[in-house]
Amino acid sequence: MKNKKLFPEELQINDKIRVTVNILGQKFPVDGTYKGNTNDSINILTNANPDPVELSLSKIKEITITEKYSKSGQFDAHIDELIQEFMKIVAIPSDTKNINAENTKNHIVIYNEFSFQHELGMYFRNRLTNYNITFERNIKDFNIEDNDTNNPMVKHEIDIVIEDKNNDSKFAIELKFPRKGMYPEQMYYFIKDIRFMEQVQERDKSHYFKNTYCVTLVDDQNFYLAHKPGMKTKNFIYEHFRTDISNKLKEITGEIHKPTGTIKEKTEKYVKIDGKYNIEWKHLNEKKQQIAEKNHANYKEARYYLCKIQPQKNKEDD
C-alpha cells in the first residue's frame, strides 16, 4: 500500500520520478523510473544501474513525477536515448583488467556480439515494459518480401525488434561488435547493416517500423583512427570511419563498393545507400579513460556509434 502523504495519487508504474533522499541531514535528488513499492521501500530504475534499486521510505522526503508514462507509446521517440544510456554502463573485458573493480561493479560487461545483443535486449525489457523485445526475427515475420532480383535484401534476420503491445509500432536494431580485425571487410558490413535497415523501412508495406537503428561497438582504434596523425587513408572505405587529415569523415551515401577481393572474386560489387549518413564515434565512457590514465594503465579505448536510419519514401508509393 502506498504512503498517501509521500506518493502522488496519480503515480503509476513506469512514470519518470524524482526522489529526494535525506542522507545525514543532506538532501539528494535521485531521478529514475518508478517500478513499484512495498510498505517500507520504493523501487526505482536509474541510469547508473542495470537493475532497479530499492530505497527505504524512511529516508525519502519527497517524490515528484517528472514525466507521465503513456500506454499509447510514451517511448516511441526515446529508443535512441535508451541506447545511449545503455552504452554509458557498458564495459568490455579489457576495461575490467585495467580499472579497479569498484569502478566497474555497476557496469554491464560485454564479451562479444552475442552478449552485446542479449544485454541490450534485457536492458530494453527492464525499461520498456509495454513492449515485446525479441531477437533474430526473420523479415517474413513482418510480411517483408525479398522478391526484387535487382535489389535483393542484404540480410533476412533482424538482431533486435521492439514491438508495442498496444499498437503496431515497431523498431529494429542491427548490432556489430567486431573482435578479429579485418577492418575493410567489417566496415563494409557496417554499411550493409545501414542498407538493411533502410530496406526494412522501404519494404514495410504497413509502415509499422517507425524507426530503425545501427549500433556498432569497437575496442580497436584501427576502426576509427588513421595509423598516423594526418595520414590520409589508402582504402576508400576507411574514409567513412577513420579520421583523415581534416578530422572529418566522408558521408555514407550512394554506391559503396566492396573493398576486398579481385574483380573475378566479387560476386557482390557494391551496396547502394539511399540516405545520407555521417558516422560520429563516441567514447564508450570518458571516466574510464580518465581513471586508467590516473592509474597509468594501458587502456585500449573503446568507442561506438549510433546511426538512426532516415525513413526513405516507400518505393511502392511512387
Image (tube, rainbow, N blue to C red):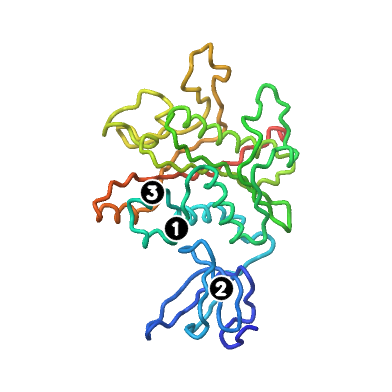
Amino acid residing under circle 2: Asn
Q: Residue at x 65, y 42 (%)?
A: 136
Mark 2 touches mark 1? (CB < 8 Å): no
What percent of the width, then of the height, locates residue 103?
A: 37, 61
Amino acid residing under circle 3: His
Which of these two is toward me, 6 or 202? 6
Residue receiving disc 2? 43
Residue receiving disc 3? 283
Q: CA distance from mark 3 to mark 1?
A: 15 Å
| Location of residue 166 with respect to 263 vertically, above or below | below
What percent of the width, then of the height, locates residue 212?
A: 60, 44
Q: Which mark is residue 52?
A: none
Whichever of labels 2 and 1 marks the residue nearer the N terminus, that label is 2
Q: Residue at x 60, y 35 (%)?
A: 196
Of helix, strand and loop, which one carries label 3?
strand
| Location of residue 61 with respect to 177 vertically, above or below | below
Q: Residue at x 26, y 52 (%)?
A: 293
Query: So how many labels did they put on this image?
Result: 3
What percent of the width, then of the height, locates residue 162?
A: 64, 51
On the picture, is 133 further left or further right than 284? right
| Location of residue 38 with respect to 305 vertically, above or below | below
Q: Quadrant of residue 77?
A: bottom right
Residue receiving disc 1? 107
CA neighbours of label 2 inside 10 A, class few (<14), some (14 to 19), many (20+) = some
Between disc 2 and disc 1, the foreground one is 1
Q: CA distance from mark 2 to mark 1?
A: 19 Å
Q: CA distance from mark 2 to mark 3?
A: 30 Å
Whichever of labels 2 and 3 marks the residue nearer the N terminus, that label is 2
Q: Quadrant of residue 123?
A: bottom right
Of helix, strand and loop, which one carries label 2?
strand
